[in-house]
Image (cartoon, helix red, strand yellow):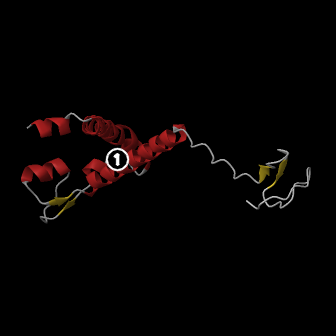
Amino acid sequence: MKEFKAFAMRGNVLDMAIGIIIGVAFGKIVTSFVNDVVMPPIGLLLGKVDFSNLFIDLSGKSYATLAEAKAAGAATIKYGVFLNTVVDFIIVAFVIFLLVKQVNRMKAKPAPAPAAPNTRDCPYCLSNIPLKASRCAFCTAELKLA
């Protein structure tokens, strides 16, 4: 039990739980946004179609609404509800993309690695000379190649 408590109280587990709870709440907001704000104008543009009420009746009978078909216990394919769910997903995926993009932009960028030196100091006169020099241009001392 102590081991489980230690696992559950670690920061990563708590952060994940909080993220899931916030994600579920955010999902409800997006679902409401799609069903109540986005889809009605799209349905109006397409001839006053209510996407959540689009279905195919598999029982062979005719029902005016999805609610009637459900009440009768008819087997239906609810493709309008599916379309709403697809729009939900696209909006959530786009918002998450924007969020990750902003977080990545705010992350501290690593400092560029310092450039390799291309000069060194002469051990005799301490003048700055090229790494490949075999003789110092200032004091003419012979140097070992680096």
Q: Quadrant of residue 105?
A: top right
Residue pointed to by mark 1:
88
Q: Residue at x 19, y 51 (%)?
A: 66
Residue 37 appears left or right of 71: right
- Along the line of sight, the residue nearer the viewer: 93 or 71: 93
| Crowd tier of the residue under label 1, counting other residues whose Cα lies within 10 Å: few below 14, some 14–19, many 20 or above | many
**Circle 1: residue type:** Asp
Task: Please tell me whether mark 1 sits on a helix, a strand or a loop.
Answer: helix
| Place of residue 85 in the rendered image (x, y in percent of width and height, measured from the top left) | 30, 50
Specify whether 87 is left or right of 10. Answer: right
Q: Nearer the viewer, residue 50 or 119?
A: 119
Number of marks in picture: 1
Q: Residue at x 92, y 50 (%)?
A: 138
Residue 136 position in % (x across, y down): 87, 54
Residue 123 x/y as whole percent:
79, 48
Looking at the image, which is closer to me, 41 or 89?
Answer: 89
